[in-house]
Amino acid sequence: MKVTGIIAEYNPFHNGHKYHLDKAREITGADYCIVVMSGNYTQRGEPALMDKYLRTRSALENGADLVLELPLCHACASAPGFADGAVSLLENLGVVDYLVFGSESGNASLLQEAASVLSSEPPSYRQTLKRLLRSGLSYPSAQSDALLSYLRFADTDSTALHKIHSLELSSLLSSSNNLLGIAYCRSLLSFKSSILPITILRNGSSYSDSALPAETPAAAGKPDTSKGSSENGQEIKCTTASALAIRTALQTVQTPDCTESIRPYIPDSVYDLMRKEYHKCFPVFPDMLSQMLHYKLLSQADSGAGFSDYLDVSPDLSDRILRHLSEYRNFSSFCLLLKTKELTYTRISRCLLHIFLDIRKSGPENSGKNGASYARILGFQSRSVPLLTAIKANASIPLISKLADAGKILPEDALHRLKKDVQSAHLYNALILHAYGTRLPDETRCQIIRV
């Protein structure tokens, strides 16, 4: 049995994701594809556009065999925490042979070498990183510049990283999917995993493109014919619309027929699901957090405790929140107001989400944040029962199919993290109830999706 792992958010699921699943299976010859997917909140620090059960169904109807939920403490963490949680979950299943992810580079060797340097942190690299951080650079920028400096002056030139041009290396270290790929490779090294990383060249629209392409693909619901190549020589085709562009299009024009504009960029089954659930429990946008977050910020500020007890919130950011709280209008504008050269929008958004969800630095949900301690099933294909049997026989962590059974099989710290997942789902459901008047089933009664 060959098993391929994929780490995703599917926010929302689009043609590029469908292509990724198909190509991952083709390249690896996998019998099964397991997706580790964020729940109702994303790594950018925002609520997901569609709830995790709708996104699970989308994945299963388009090539995934099993969808597992990435626990909240990892799903809304920075890239290293996100990668550690997802990679450790795949590793602990005991059946995964490959991890396939997209990247702007398309070269797994380069990403692995960069991961190796960042993991070992040679003294000269570490000193430069500290100096750049003290100068006021954000951590991603400082990390990139420190690695560039290290490679420029290192004694050896035998590696592939030393042989590429500095501009190419700079691009390698500044592109979103490359950085996430490096984080995955670092996690694989950290866990001494035997899982083989494979990357597929990302082509077409950039991850950060916020507008739909001017020209639609020739066939609705199909990727266009833009071609690229992966490290193993496979020809690839990609959709040209990013998930961000799709979310932006849905938010810009909120009318019953607005999903027509994104139809060419999503599979037919996802389009049908969106049409069915539009303005019932979808879409969910970041600013829907605004009122509840404002209440939480005001309550915390009135207590005089500040916000530095929350995960990733520095004393400086806590002070900025307190100073600017009287100017609060909504979630997104407050992120922009708090943004500085050192604090990126995404970092602030993630910190505010931690406050909203009450995720604290010393909270029990973070006691095991460097590795997943359970695997919760969101959905699976009926033909994948042999995969579930293999996981049950080989996994080093519990496989959760019923929340009611969790208390019997999870240790206390893992149970706390699962309870935080459930609590956060209830808050997400409250956002939907407030926006659309739809009362979704209680998280403890939700059924596994089976197709």
Image (spheres, rainbow, N blue to C red):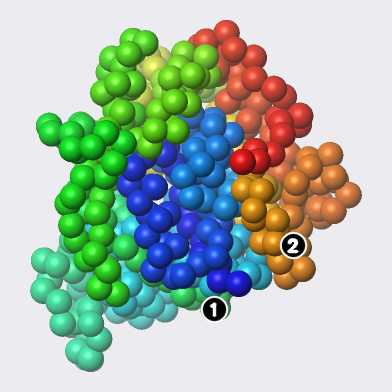
Q: Name which residue type carries label 2.
A: Thr
| Residue at 48% across, 54% down | 7
Q: Are marks 1 and 2 in contact (CB under 8 Å)?
A: no
Front-lying residue, 345 or 21: 21
Secondary element at image label 2: helix
Q: Quadrant of the N terminus?
A: bottom right
Q: Is residue 404 above or below residue 225?
A: above
Mark 2 — residue?
Answer: 389
> Mark 1 or mark 2, which has the lower sequence index?
1
Q: Position of residue 194 (x, y in %)?
A: 54, 78
Q: Position of residue 416 (x, y in %)?
A: 74, 44
Front-lying residue, 57 or 361: 57
| Residue at 18% across, 57% down | 227
| Residue at 26% across, 50% down | 238
Residue closest to the far right: 408
Residue 194, numbered circle: 1
Residue 370, numbered circle: none
Q: Is residue 404 above or below residue 136?
A: above
Q: Position of residue 261 (x, y in %)?
A: 26, 23
Front-lying residue, 120 or 108: 108
Whether residue 303 can be seen here: no
Front-lying residue, 393 or 127: 393
The crowd level at tag 1 (other Cα within 10 Å; few <14, some 14-19, many 20+) is few
Q: Nearer the viewer, mark 1 or mark 2?
A: 2
| Residue at 53% across, 59% down | 33
Q: Quadrant of the C terminus?
A: top right
Q: Name which residue type carries label 1.
A: Ser
The crowd level at tag 2 (other Cα within 10 Å; few <14, some 14-19, many 20+) is few
Q: Position of residue 323 (x, y in %)?
A: 39, 24
